[in-house]
Amino acid sequence: MPMKNPPAAYRRKWNLYTRYRLRPEQVDAMRDAQGGVCGICKEAMKRERVDHCHTTNRVRGLLCHRCNVVLHGLENPEYMTAATAYLERHK
Protein backbone atom coordinates (compact mmCIF):
# COMPACT_ATOMS: atom_id res chain seq x y z
CA MET A 1 0.00 0.00 0.00
CA PRO A 2 1.45 3.46 -0.94
CA MET A 3 2.36 5.94 1.77
CA LYS A 4 -0.14 8.77 2.24
CA ASN A 5 2.48 11.43 3.06
CA PRO A 6 5.93 10.16 2.10
CA PRO A 7 8.93 12.13 3.40
CA ALA A 8 10.33 14.85 1.11
CA ALA A 9 13.56 12.91 0.50
CA TYR A 10 11.57 9.90 -0.70
CA ARG A 11 9.41 12.07 -3.01
CA ARG A 12 12.53 13.74 -4.46
CA LYS A 13 14.19 10.38 -5.10
CA TRP A 14 11.02 8.97 -6.69
CA ASN A 15 10.52 12.06 -8.90
CA LEU A 16 14.13 12.10 -10.10
CA TYR A 17 14.00 8.46 -11.05
CA THR A 18 10.55 8.35 -12.64
CA ARG A 19 11.01 11.58 -14.63
CA TYR A 20 14.68 11.45 -15.59
CA ARG A 21 16.02 8.01 -14.58
CA LEU A 22 18.45 9.76 -12.23
CA ARG A 23 19.55 8.87 -8.72
CA PRO A 24 20.17 11.66 -6.18
CA GLU A 25 23.91 10.86 -6.28
CA GLN A 26 23.94 11.57 -10.02
CA VAL A 27 22.26 14.94 -9.49
CA ASP A 28 24.76 15.72 -6.72
CA ALA A 29 27.60 14.89 -9.13
CA MET A 30 26.08 17.15 -11.82
CA ARG A 31 25.79 19.99 -9.29
CA ASP A 32 29.42 19.50 -8.22
CA ALA A 33 30.58 19.44 -11.85
CA GLN A 34 28.79 22.78 -12.42
CA GLY A 35 30.35 24.30 -9.31
CA GLY A 36 26.94 24.47 -7.60
CA VAL A 37 25.64 27.15 -9.96
CA CYS A 38 23.15 27.34 -12.84
CA GLY A 39 24.49 26.00 -16.13
CA ILE A 40 23.42 29.19 -17.94
CA CYS A 41 23.51 32.27 -15.70
CA LYS A 42 26.14 30.88 -13.29
CA GLU A 43 24.14 32.16 -10.28
CA ALA A 44 23.34 30.10 -7.19
CA MET A 45 20.28 27.93 -7.78
CA LYS A 46 17.56 28.72 -5.27
CA ARG A 47 15.04 26.58 -7.18
CA GLU A 48 17.17 23.96 -8.90
CA ARG A 49 15.69 22.26 -11.97
CA VAL A 50 16.86 19.28 -14.01
CA ASP A 51 17.07 20.49 -17.61
CA HIS A 52 16.26 17.95 -20.30
CA CYS A 53 15.43 17.82 -23.99
CA HIS A 54 11.68 17.40 -24.39
CA THR A 55 12.19 15.54 -27.67
CA THR A 56 14.77 12.96 -26.57
CA ASN A 57 14.33 13.17 -22.76
CA ARG A 58 18.13 13.41 -22.49
CA VAL A 59 19.23 15.25 -19.36
CA ARG A 60 21.48 18.23 -20.18
CA GLY A 61 22.29 19.67 -16.76
CA LEU A 62 20.97 21.71 -13.85
CA LEU A 63 19.46 25.16 -14.19
CA CYS A 64 17.88 27.72 -11.92
CA HIS A 65 14.11 28.00 -12.29
CA ARG A 66 14.30 31.29 -14.23
CA CYS A 67 16.78 29.99 -16.83
CA ASN A 68 14.81 26.77 -17.22
CA VAL A 69 11.63 28.73 -18.02
CA VAL A 70 13.43 31.07 -20.45
CA LEU A 71 15.15 28.15 -22.17
CA HIS A 72 11.79 26.49 -22.77
CA GLY A 73 10.62 29.65 -24.56
CA LEU A 74 13.79 29.79 -26.68
CA GLU A 75 13.23 26.22 -27.84
CA ASN A 76 9.69 27.02 -29.03
CA PRO A 77 9.68 29.03 -32.32
CA GLU A 78 5.99 29.97 -32.01
CA TYR A 79 6.60 31.37 -28.54
CA MET A 80 9.61 33.37 -29.75
CA THR A 81 7.58 34.88 -32.61
CA ALA A 82 4.74 35.82 -30.27
CA ALA A 83 7.12 37.23 -27.65
CA THR A 84 8.97 39.33 -30.24
CA ALA A 85 5.68 40.67 -31.62
CA TYR A 86 4.51 41.53 -28.10
CA LEU A 87 7.72 43.46 -27.37
CA GLU A 88 7.41 45.32 -30.67
CA ARG A 89 3.81 46.33 -29.88
CA HIS A 90 4.79 47.64 -26.46
CA LYS A 91 7.93 49.67 -27.22
Image (spheres, rainbow, N blue to C red):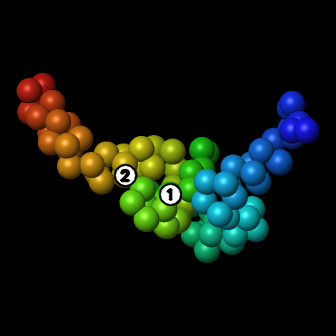
Residue sitting at the far top: 90
Amino acid type assigned to the residue bearing label 1 in the image: Asp
| Circle 1 SS class | strand
User: Is residue 77 depicted above or below 6 in this figure?
Assistant: below
The C terminus is located in which quarter? top left
User: Is residue 74 depicted above or below 34 in this figure?
Assistant: above
Marks 1/2: CA distance? 9 Å
Choose between 35 and 85: the one closer to the eye.
Answer: 85
64 sits to left or right of 13: left
| Labelled pair 1, 2 in contact (Cβ < 8 Å) | yes
**Comes first in the chain, label 1 or label 2:** 1
Q: Which mark is residue 7?
A: none
Say which residue appears at 52% left-offset and 50% top-offset. Answer: 64
Indicate the position of residue 37 as horizontal and vertical percent values. Answer: 57, 60
88 sits to left or right of 35: left
Amino acid type assigned to the residue bearing label 2 in the image: Leu
Q: Quadrant of residue 34?
A: bottom right
Residue receiving disc 1? 51
For disc 1, the neighbor class at 10 Å (few under 14, some 14 to 19, many from 20) is many
Say which residue appears at 20% left-offset and 37% top-offset. Answer: 83
Residue receiving disc 2? 71
37 sits to left or right of 88: right
Indicate the position of residue 87 as horizontal and vertical percent values. Answer: 15, 33
Look at the image and tell me whether residue 90 can be seen.
yes
Indicate the position of residue 49 as horizontal and vertical percent values. Answer: 56, 51
Choose between 67 and 16: the one closer to the eye.
Answer: 16
| Circle 2 SS class | helix
